[in-house]
């Protein structure tokens, strides 16, 4: 197992290039199952979730060819199975997108229940099931396997989502792309990666309108063919480096981004006294003065993203006064607070709200990541803390952040990844 060792207190300076969006990539890769021909997908992030999904497609019979580190050719023409029940399926939440892709192509899907980050209890798929049932699928769950079957193909219909669900919106859009007739998804999620998936499917021959609004209209097509597509930049990775710059001080240029995707994050950092300058495809984040308190509530896009909630909380631990962070998407996403408390943070949880009393400085400590974004928050805390921080559970972080250690090192952070064996030798030497 790998750990991160951080000697904090260094302001960050320089430029950081943002990778392709994890949340878009893990939807687009399953979508390749529906394409009759070769898809060349560019700007894929080098993260474990992408590698896992590509491995799953390969196990199902797809031909995968790496063109370079961020580009792959995927040919699913000869995939003939509807079974996706490998142990690797349980590692990532996005595995449930295979339900929509397989139903759309074959009229049947046998998919292991998803895994992924450990927060908020079980992540239900009730809205997915409701939508596919309305489209004519019979669905059962037994021994951790979701089995969905149609008589022939999915049928287009109107579906109203009871809650704004990114996962359900994506899954239903996948199934509808090859369904018969027209499907309307009302109260749809509007996140940038949903628009990116729609653009990918349309570039392969689908007919999808309205992505990015709360009503998506899909007219099913009989066939999609291959082509080229480049994944959008990662909104959350960019926001994480913006938060790191705010927490540590210094000046960081976050490059290769779409600034409008980051507006809710930029607004909150400005409220905290951080200078944020938007350019055409980059953002400059600079902090020269103490952080100010603010109040944050996560909401579906274009609101403040839930995937940035832990990171902004880590920054607010050192803001002057009392701040609040309210989680408006998940029931419980504050498991990381206990770890921040070990570093001297003063945080109280009341229901869905964290009340944060700013402290002068955090102190380095041994801590452990409980999920992907919590891990990013602990890295931010470690970068700004006094002394050494050792973070365990970094496999979560590497699910969604490409080369975080090297990117932060280039900004002047004192951070390195070590193995358990190296950690043992380090402790002996220090003792």
Image (cartoon, helix red, strand yellow):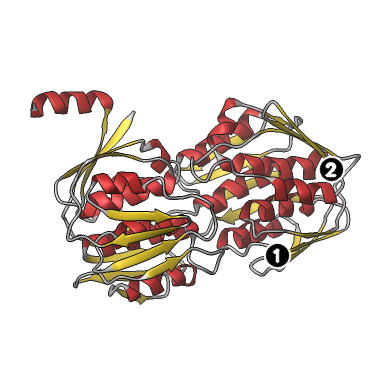
Front-most of residues 313 and 241: 313
Q: Residue at x 33, y 45 (%)?
A: 338
Q: Is residue 107 visible?
A: yes
Q: Residue furthest right?
A: 151
SS class of the residue under badge 2?
loop
Image coordinates for residue 227, horizontal then vertical, percent: 66, 52
- Neighbour class for label 2 at 10 Å: few (<14), some, many (≥20)? many
Closer to the camera in the image, 233 or 325: 325
**Residue 287 appears in which quarter of the rendering?**
bottom left
Rendering coords of residue 197 (x, y %): 63, 56
Question: Which mark sits nearer the N-terminus, 2 or 1?
Answer: 2
Nearest the eye: 340 or 146 = 340
Residue 410 appears left or right of 89: left
Q: Quadrant of the C terminus?
A: top left
Answer above or below: position of 182 versus 81: below
Determine the CA span between mark 2 and mark 1: 21 Å
Q: Classify 382 as above or below 76.
A: below
Evaluate if marks 2 and 1 touch, with contact meaning CB atoms under 8 Å apart: no
Q: Is residue 129 above or below residue 324?
A: above
Q: Callout 1 environment at 10 Å: few (<14), some (14 to 19), or many (20+)?
A: some
Residue topped by disc 2:
137
Q: Residue at x 35, y 64 (%)?
A: 254
Badge 1 marks a residue whose secondary structure is loop
19 vs 325, nearest the viewer: 325
On screen, residue 294 versus residue 49, left or right, reads left
Where does the image place residue 88, in percent across and percent down from the top left? 56, 29
For residue 358, what is the image quadrant?
bottom left
Please report the residue visible at 43 percent of the width from the left and 54 percent of the height from the top. Answer: 19
- The numbered dot on residue 371 is none
Residue on which disc 1 sits:
187
Q: Residue at x 14, y 46 (%)?
A: 387
Instruction: Say how many tags the image has.
Output: 2
């Amino acid at each position: 197992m790998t750990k991160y060792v951080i000697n904090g207190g260094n302001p960050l300076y320089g430029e950081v290039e943002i990778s392709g969006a994890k949340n878009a990539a893990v939807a687009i890769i399953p979508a390749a199952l529906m394409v009759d021909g070769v898809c060349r997908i560019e700007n894929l992030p080098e993260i474990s979730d992408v590698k896992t999904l590509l491995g799953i497609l390969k196990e199902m019979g797809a031909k995968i060819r790496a063109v370079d580190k961020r580009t792959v050719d995927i040919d699913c023409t000869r995939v003939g199975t509807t079974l996706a029940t490998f142990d690797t399926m349980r590692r990532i939440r996005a595995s449930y997108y295979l339900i929509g892709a397989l139903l759309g192509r074959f009229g049947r899907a046998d998919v292991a229940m998803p895994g992924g980050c450990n927060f908020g209890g079980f992540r239900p798929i009730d809205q997915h099931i409701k939508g596919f049932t309305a489209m004519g699928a019979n669905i059962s769950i037994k021994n951790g396997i979701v089995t969905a079957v149609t008589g022939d193909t999915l049928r287009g219909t109107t579906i109203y989502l009871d809650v704004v669900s990114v996962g359900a919106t994506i899954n239903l859009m996948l199934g509808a792309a090859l369904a018969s007739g027209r499907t309307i998804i009302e109260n749809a999620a509007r996140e940038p990666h949903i628009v990116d998936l729609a653009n990918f499917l349309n570039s392969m021959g689908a007919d999808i309108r309205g992505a990015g609004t709360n009503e998506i209209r899909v007219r099913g097509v009989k066939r999609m063919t291959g082509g080229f597509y480049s994944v959008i930049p990662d909104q959350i990775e960019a926001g994480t480096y913006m938060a790191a710059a705010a927490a540590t001080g210094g000046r960081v240029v976050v490059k290769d981004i779409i600034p409008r995707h980051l507006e809710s994050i930029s607004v909150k950092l400005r409220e905290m006294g951080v200078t944020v300058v938007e350019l055409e495809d980059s953002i400059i984040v600079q902090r020269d003065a103490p952080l100010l308190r603010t109040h944050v509530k996560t909401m579906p896009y274009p609101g403040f993203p839930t995937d940035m909630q832990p990171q902004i909380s880590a920054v607010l631990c050192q803001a002057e006064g009392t701040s609040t962070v309210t989680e408006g998407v998940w029931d419980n996403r504050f498991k990381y607070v206990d770890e921040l408390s070990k570093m001297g943070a003063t945080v109280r949880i009341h229901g869905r709200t964290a009340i944060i009393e700013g402290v002068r400085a955090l102190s380095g400590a041994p801590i452990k990541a409980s999920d992907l974004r919590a891990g990013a928050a602990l890295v931010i805390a470690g970068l700004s803390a006094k002394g050494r921080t050792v973070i365990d559970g970094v496999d979560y972080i590497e699910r969604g952040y490409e080369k975080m250690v090297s990117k932060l090192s280039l900004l002047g952070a004192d951070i390195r990844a070590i193995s358990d064996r190296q950690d043992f030798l380090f402790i002996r030497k220090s003792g």
